[in-house]
Amino acid sequence: MLKAFTGGRATAYERLSASGKKDNPEKNASFFSRITYAWYSSVISLGYKKPLEREDLFELNEGDSAYRIYPAFETNWRKEVSEHEKRGSGHRRGLLFRALWNTYKASVIQVALMKLAADILAFASPQILKQMIFFCESRSEQPWNGYIFAVALLVVTILQTLVLQLYQQFNMLTAVKFKTSITGLIYKKSLNLANTSRRKFTAGELVNLMSSDAQQFMDLMVNINLLWSAPFQILMAIVFLWQELGAAILAGVAVLVLIIPLNAYIASKVKQLKKSHLKSKDQRIKLLNEVLHGIKILKLYAWEPSYQKKVVDIREGEMDVLKSTGYLTTFSMLTLTCIPFLVSIATFGVYFLLDDANILTASKVFTTISLFNILRLPLFDLPTVISLVMQTKVSLGRLENFFCGEELNPRDIETNYNGNHAVGFTGASLQWEKTGPYILKDLNVKVPEGALVAVVGQVGSGKSSLLSAILGEMNKLEGTIQRRGSVAYVSQQAWIQNAVFQENILFGLSYDRQYYGQVLDACALLPDLELLPNGDQTEIGERGVNLSGGQKQRVSLARAVYNNADIYLLDDPLSAVDVHVGRHLFDKVIGRNGLLKNKTRILVTHSLTVLPQADLVVLMEDGKIVQFGTYGDLVSKRQNFADMMRSLDSHEEKEESPVKEARNVTASKGQQGDILTEKHRPKQTRMNKEKVATGNMKMSVVMKYLRSFGWLWVFFTVVAYIGQNATAIGQNVWLSQWTTEAKSVKDAAEWTDLRSNRLGIYGALGFVQGLFVCYGAYVITRGTIYASRSLHNQMLDDILHLPLQFFEMTPMGQVLNRFTKDVYVIDERFHYYLRTWLNCMLDVLGTILVIIYATPLFTLVIIPLAFFYLLIQRYYIASSRQIRRLDGASRSPVISQFGETLLGVSTIRAYGHQERFMNQNKDVVNENLVCYYNNVLSNRWLAVRLEFLGNLMVFFATLFAVLAGDTMSSSTVGLSITYALNITQTLNFWVRKACEIETNGIAVERICEYEEMEKEAPWVLPKRPPLGWPDKGVIEFTNYQARYRKDLDLALRDVTFQLFSTEKLGIVGRTGAGKSTLTNCLLRVVEGAGGHIVIDGIDIATIGLHDLRSKLNIIPQDPVLFSGSLRMNLDPLEKHSDSALWDALEMCHMKNFVQSLPKKLYHDLSEGGENLSVGQRQLICLARALLRKSKILVLDEATASIDMETDNLVQTTIRKAFYDCTVLTIAHRLHTVLDSERVLVLDSGKIVEFGEPKNLIRNRGVFSKMVSEAGIPLSADPAK
């Protein structure tokens, strides 16, 4: 029997040979198969047997794929923009909507015609019901007339089902095209957005545009036809009601006229609240985005509670808005439930007043009730869709504001010009923001083709901005900029993709094994590949989290070299690597004998030793090129330049003969082959992918939500819904009995008494129903707020307690997806599905009880129908649940890829790879569309079968009424069939909501997922250190061992040493030696696997993390700043006075710069501090450290991004400010550790040397060799 529902055995489908994905059989399916969705039964059947996977889903039809949607919409968008520019009008209002309409108007019209047909068929049922009641009242007609009415009712309801489901399918697929088009345009706009406009939109806001505002547009398009359909249905209903009750229906219309403006007012209020909610949501996501990407600094400084409070405070603002919205929707729910009652009581009351002879008959009552039931949905839908229009108007404004943002002007860069220079500036002045200050002023310089140009200058002098100007990233005010040839760009902070190591270097180019090997060798990456778990096939995490700073910079450099461009823009790529590695990179890549020797190279550097090998040197100061020429000319003729060079001669590595090749920098040919062929490698360690749950949703998930909701509110909700359904049934039963009694009325007086009593009680039942509705809406709103607050805050707390390794292995898109999409489901959808499911269940039970009460024979039919209903539900729900899970999981890559693109947009544009990344976006969006498409089809498959069961119920209720003959009154027949007509959609709705609860319950499941993950140690323990601890700064490592994960080898092995109070220790070693691991262990970022670390007599493993981290001081290698004021970044806990902040800035040589800013300490920093140079960011981080009074300071290559002169000043500041502190310094510039009291040399996690620098140099060991390789004379006195 089930096969009859599924259209028999599904036709076998072939897997696409190239991709292993299923071809779509829809286009080859028969007409019957397409209208019943029998062709989709194979997926449903497979999902019943096993959890579905992505490969089991059917592919999209060609016209529904992102590869067709994007170009089709883009053509119309460009046309609209072009016409707008020709008209020369101002704001681009309406362009987006017009472009969408012109692209999809054929589909929208087709969907509208289907909706029209479904609406007309909906009004056929009450007319057949009317004839059926006439038949039952007269009984004089031929019996076969009754059977004709029963069959006619069955045919009409089946036709309505088929048309309605086709409408739903095409409607949903058309709506998602609108969302996909907007998503694609947002992505493309982000790739081309000028920095002037980019600074107005944070990454969190852009993610919200793509996830929330595009979704809002789709939600509107799903319901857009209701704007005309609802008034059409209301008008049709009024016409038919006029036929039944005459002019009395005008009273009902008057009620509608009064209610609709009220609903419109509510909709406008909801719009305002929506706007406020979106603003708060933007702020929350923006802050969360920064917290997640800056989580390391939050943990190192023990700032999690402070930022947690900030997020919770913003969330409380959201809760207030949601609460107000919930209370406003109480009126909408009252409208949905009580308008039919209000309209009917007004209509019946006036009907009686117009003429005392007016008597309610069964045909009038139940035809009227049937029409009122049809009227209920459009009356509710109309204000809802109006509200959606208002909300979408807000989103449309936000989207158009973004789309109106200024794009990069390719005409700023001249590419066709006379001359043999590769790059040229003539009188060029540039700025980042049109209203901001000049950043680069009056640039006049020409770079010959094939030249190596070194750009030097102090922090903030405009070195990185110069490269940005060459790339066309800045706003040109005057002058000309010329550039000829392709460009490769290495940014100061390396941008690494969440992809395989090899893909990061190839960057979309084809694989040339020989050249690839040369690039790896030249960029000193071969030894690193030996350390990675799967060589060059190891997956690199977001932002390169599983690579060191030096490795990230070398990968970025290798990408540029492999690109084989004409011009190379290198923004201080040597700062993040060890000195000997830096010399290797210069000699093998950048220098006169390197791979790029014939290319034009513009190198920003703080390493002045490379200047003699440069063809030309540019000295920048305050955004101007103050000196330009050969190194020899500048030293001999230019006093400023000569002074700068001489000031560094006591610290900077001296220029020696080419550096000797270190064993761990290069590899032999044989080793290269082994590395690239991945011999004997362990199983690859990959990033944590989005988990897709399988099987039934755990009941514990629903229980978790209900506990958060509050059991008291759950109880009150159930009581409220039982009450409103009981009173609704009571009203209709009351009317049925009224019409039965009306037949036996003998005179007008008796009828007047009867109608007064009956109408009064009918009104009272309606009033009680309204009370239950209002009460139910109130308790649901209260419970929802409790649940939303509890689940969000618990997830935030769980996230912040997870160890740092979790964030290094998990794409941030996954976490943000939970704080956006999943939190949205909890806030606005899950409670709706639960209460709707409860309401539908009570409706179905009530309907069945009423039909059985009216027609006891119906019991014989309900049992087999219930069996098939449960069978179909069980058969379907397994597939649908899994498809929805796949749909949810497929959204994260869309967000992750977008976020990654935003971070690397300058690099992508520099290489000219916008089109390639656009295609990547199409790929991930298309994967999500496949899951969505299959979800739509599975819902249609279910709806056709469930509504067919409902139609059978209507048929049998009608048939039994015919068979009952005179034993069944016409009023009872009317009551029975009226309820049966309602059950068709209610059954479908009930199962759909049961499935929605399961599939959207995944949001609760995903939010609670972090609760069960292993957390880091408690922040605070009962045993707390003394208030002044540490007071000496004595550090003891005893046989200490550590590993990053249980399945990995030890990163530190038997480390034992002691630091005395106020001692200064330098920590050195090759890449991967364990330098950063040592400091991570000191701060318990990595927990020990053996041994002890004791600080001032307290084993750090015995105290809470915050008691430890808040007492230590660290300046990390990556300078992390947050959007907000400069003051907030310096002192987020607001513990220090302004004068203390100014003192700290003065010590960091940043006071003059901050005083020059209009708002000074309250200067607004953009996201990540991007409106400061990297060097300035590092100095701000140093100032932040100066404010933290601690006896222990850790410097992790804290001055890598600042010039040598400022570095010397900063080192002097550190020695002065932290003279009474124990200082541990990790440095690539060996001169920064030569004045340390002792030096610790690490190799492969072990201490290989430990002692005073002069003794280690004298011993001619590992440290001595490193000093030699750095070009520092071994006779040099380290104390100097």
Image (cartoon, helix red, strand yellow):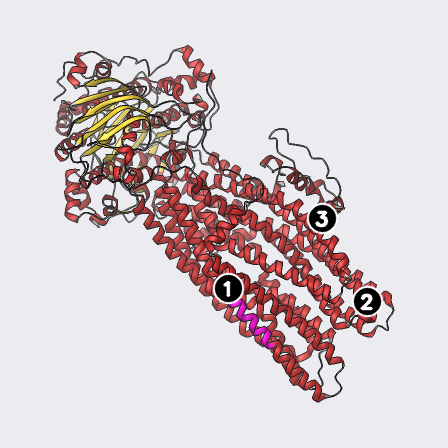
Instruction: Rate crowding at label 3 as few (under 14), some (14 to 19) or many (20 or more) other CA atoms within 10 Å.
Output: many
Q: Which mark is residue 964?
A: 2
Q: Is residue 405 visible?
A: no
Going from N to C along the chain, the mark reached first, 3 or 2, is 3
Say what secondary structure mark 2 lies in: helix
Looking at the image, residue 650 sits to the left or right of residue 769; the answer is left
Say what secondary structure mark 1 lies in: helix
Q: Nearer the viewer, mark 3 or mark 1?
A: 1
Estimate the x, y position of residue 867 in percent, counting from the top left.
71, 51
Looking at the image, residue 881 sits to the left or right of residue 801; the answer is right
Q: Nearer the viewer, mark 3 or mark 2?
A: 2
Q: Which mark is residue 36?
A: 3
Estimate the x, y position of residue 834 in percent, counting from the top left.
55, 55
For the point 70% across and 89% down, the residue is: 749
Kindly indicate the quadrant of the structure image that contains residue 1116. top left
Check disc 1 and report the residue beneath it: 777
The disc labelled 3 sits on which kind of residue?
Thr
Is residue 953 depicted above or below 887 in this figure? below
Give whichever of 1217, 580 is nearer the camera: 1217
The disc labelled 1 sits on which kind of residue?
Ala
Mark 3–mark 2 Cα distance, whole angstroms, equals 33 Å
Spot the residue most to the front.
Answer: 1022
Magenta-highlighted residues: 763-777
Is residue 743 depicted above or below 977 in this figure? below
